[in-house]
Structures are given as C-alpha cells and as structure tokens.
Image: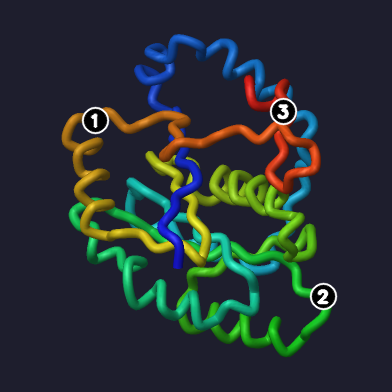
Amino acid sequence: MKASVHFIMLNTANSQLREDLPSHEVASSLSNNLSKKIDQSVNFTIASPNTCSETPIHVLVWIFSAPKNFERRKIIRKTYAKPSLFLPLEVRFVFSVALITKSMVTQRKILKEQNAYGDIVQDGTFQDAYGNLTHKAIGMLKWTNIYCKDVKLLFKVDDDSFVHSTRFAKWLQKFEDTNSWPINSVIGKLVNEYDAVNAWYMQCVISKV
C-alpha cells in the first residue's frame, strides 16, 4: 500500500474564519460559478445518513474504494479506520463507491457489507470506474453538504493508501487545541503535469485557479 494523502478541506461555516480569509470573495465567486456547472441531482443508492447524526463531528475521512475491494476495506477497518483511536476528537470514516452495472453478485455483497458496518456511501449517478473519480469527488461534496455539513475537516484518501493513525491523531489534535483548522489545504508536494499525453495532464488555466 502506498502512503499518500490527496487533499483536505474545511467547512467554513464559522463566520470568524470566513472574515479571516484574504480571498474569501474570490473563493465564493469561484464556488458559486462552479456550483452552477455541477449536476445538482442526488441519487445515493446507499446513503449512510446517520454517520454524523449522533454527535458533532470534527473530521470526516472519505476513503475512495472500488466495489470489488472488499479485502482492502476489511483491512482498513481493522487498522486506522477506528474512531476510538482519535478520541477525544470525533472522527468518522466512510467508504465511497459508485454504481455497479456488470455484477449483481458484487452489488449484493456491497449491501451485505453495508448491513454489517454501515460505513458505505454509494453514488448511483455514475458507474464506478477510474475515469469517473472526479464525479466521485463531487458526490463526496454533495453528500457532505447534505448529511455532515457542520464537520470541521473533510479528509480524502484512497483504499490503496495507509494512514498512520497515531501521527494523524496528534496532527488533528493540534488544530483542535489552537482552534486553527486548515482551510483548503493540500498535503504533500504536487507537481503539475503539462504534457497533454500524460495521464495526469492539467491545463495551465486550471492549475492556477
């Protein structure tokens, strides 16, 4: 498993935080324009709506997973995806999968897994495929806005990544102790790829936004 984290975001519901953002007006404008271009339809065939209902949640960790990766999800649940490891912070974990069209057997196993653990969110608006990861990310934001919009931190990893729970917990606790949760932060050194034939190609206009 590779050790990598892709991005984290913060819900900016706190008015003081909004005032402290130097480019809040610009960010709001970009967000409003983007929301008009995103399909607003919602169809979660598995929603797990009670994930954030019991108590205020500090951190919601989204783990992007392929439907067939049952064993990976099992290992993750047994290792770092345990809320008890992060107390007194309230941290929750959900596995994100999308529509399965070719195997009803896999879908039935997903439903059985959900009945056992209650930590799966399945977006039914698109097929689960590598090329649809952007749609999965949008679905993550839609779901969070509906079911967990007061969460302080949104954190996304893949099911082939591993999170060091002890270090992660200490890192999160620092933000809680200082009440300075990061906003729209990126972890790691990212290099933009401008070669159009590369799988990770990014247009200059996008990378500068």
Residue 75 lies, with reference to residue 208, above or below; the image says: below
Q: Name the residue at 63% across, 68% down.
A: 46
Alpha carbons under labels 3 and 1: distance apart: 29 Å
Q: Residues within 10 Å of mark 3 (few under 14, many from 20)?
A: few
CB atoms of marks 3 and 1 within 8 Å: no
Element assignment for label 3: helix
Q: Which mark is residue 179?
A: 1
Alpha carbons under labels 1 and 2: distance apart: 45 Å
Q: Residues within 10 Å of mark 2 (few under 14, many from 20)?
A: few
Residue 14 lies, with reference to residue 45, above or below; the image says: above
The type of colouring in the image is: rainbow
Observer able to see residue 143: yes
Element assignment for label 2: loop
Observer able to see residue 47: no
To which residue does mark 3 refer?
34
Dividing the picture into quadrants, the one containing residue 195 is top right
* Quadrant the N terminus occupies: bottom left
Where residue 63 appears, as percent x and y from the top left, is 50, 60
Instruction: Give the mark, 2 or 3, whose residue is nearer the N terminus.
Output: 3
Dividing the picture into quadrants, the one containing residue 93 is bottom left
Kind of residue at badge 2: Thr
Q: Residues within 10 Å of mark 1 (few under 14, many from 20)?
A: few
Instruction: Give the mark, 3 or 1, whose residue is nearer the N terminus.
Output: 3
Residue 25 lies, with reference to residue 99, above or below; the image says: above
Kind of residue at badge 3: Leu
Q: Which mark is residue 101?
A: 2
Number of numbered callouts drawn: 3
Tell which residue pokes out farthest to the bottom in this image.
105
Q: Name the residue at 73% across, 48% down.
A: 199
CB atoms of marks 1 and 2 within 8 Å: no
Q: Name the residue at 44% across, 53% down.
A: 4
Where residue 57 appears, as percent x and y from the top left, is 35, 49
